[in-house]
Image: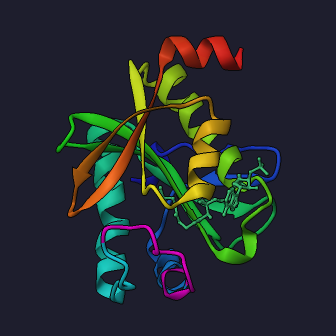
Amino acid sequence: MSTQIPTFQTVSLTLRPLRETDVPILHRIYQMKDVLAYFPSTAPPQLEKVERWISGQEKHWLEHGYGNWGIAPQGAMEIIGWAGLQFLPELDETEVGFLLSPEYWGKGYATEAALAALQFGFERIRLDHIIALVHPDNLASQRVIQKCGMTYLETIPLWGIQLMRNNISMEKYHHVHQ
Ligand SMILES: CC(C)(COP(=O)(O)OP(=O)(O)OC[C@H]1O[C@@H](n2cnc3c(N)ncnc32)[C@H](O)[C@@H]1OP(=O)(O)O)[C@@H](O)C(=O)NCCC(=O)NCCS
């Protein structure tokens, strides 16, 4: 099944399908300080939940033709996080998201991965627009979104917290990135 999920190389990263063997490392990343600080649920998930999330990703790819990738630095086997596109039934929109192990923060990796995900969403899937939902206190994530050319629309209540809804249209993406 994972052969249907494309692998991409960016300047520093490999974006590749998430696999069952990624469960322990992703579970470990979720335990790390501040990783889930701005998520609706800040408690690190059990191993079984991470397993379900990873197998759910494969289903999501099959259903929508896009989804999240595991991210590894070029040449490395082990993932350091994930990034990609997720359809949100609650909003009937597609979100770009990203999460990295703290030791890799501040190297431009999230921006690099988010831009690859936006490129895939607009150029391959031909999505009309892509949103990003960010906690108002998550300044690093807001900066990533800004560097991707996304703009703030509104703050909405979702999943029990307030989230800033940001947007980029296909038109703007092509204008900014071509
Ligand atoms: C958010 C996250 C993905 C950013 O990853 P990253 O690889 O460090 O991001 P980048 O290096 O591409 O860009 C981060 C930018 O935020 C800036 N930044 C970092 N911390 C900041 C802070 N506290 N206040 C303001 N800006 C900040 C950096 O300086 C950088 O901007 P610059 O390039 O203009 O200097 C990472 O912190 C993470 O995984 N956090 C936990 C999961 C998460 O919150 N995901 C997002 C959910 S919406």
Residue 1 spot, x, y in % from top left: 39, 53
Residue 99: image quadrant is bottom right
Residue 37 spot, x, y in % from top left: 46, 75
Q: What sort of colour scheme is used for the picture?
A: rainbow
Q: Is residue 65 magenta?
A: no
Is 135 on the left-hand or right-hand side of 73?
A: left
Residue 55 spot, x, y in % from top left: 32, 66
The quarter of the image holding the C terminus is top right
Dominant secondary structure, magenta: loop
Residue 40: image quadrant is bottom left
What is the tally of numbered marks visible in this picture? 0
The one nearer the camera, 54 or 148, is 148
Q: Which residue shows up at 48% across the image and 81% down it? A: 30
Q: Which residue shows up at 39% across the image and 67% down it? A: 39
Is 33 on the left-hand or right-hand side of 165?
A: right
Q: Which residue shows up at 48% across the image and 30% down it? A: 121
Range covered by the magenta-colored residues: 29-40
The answer to whether residue 75 is above or below residue 169 is: below
Ligand 1's quadrant is bottom right
The answer to whether residue 128 is above or below residue 138 is: above
Residue 56 spot, x, y in % from top left: 29, 61
The one nearer the camera, 68 or 18, is 68
The answer to whether residue 6 is above or below residue 176 is: below
Is 160 on the left-hand or right-hand side of 114?
A: left
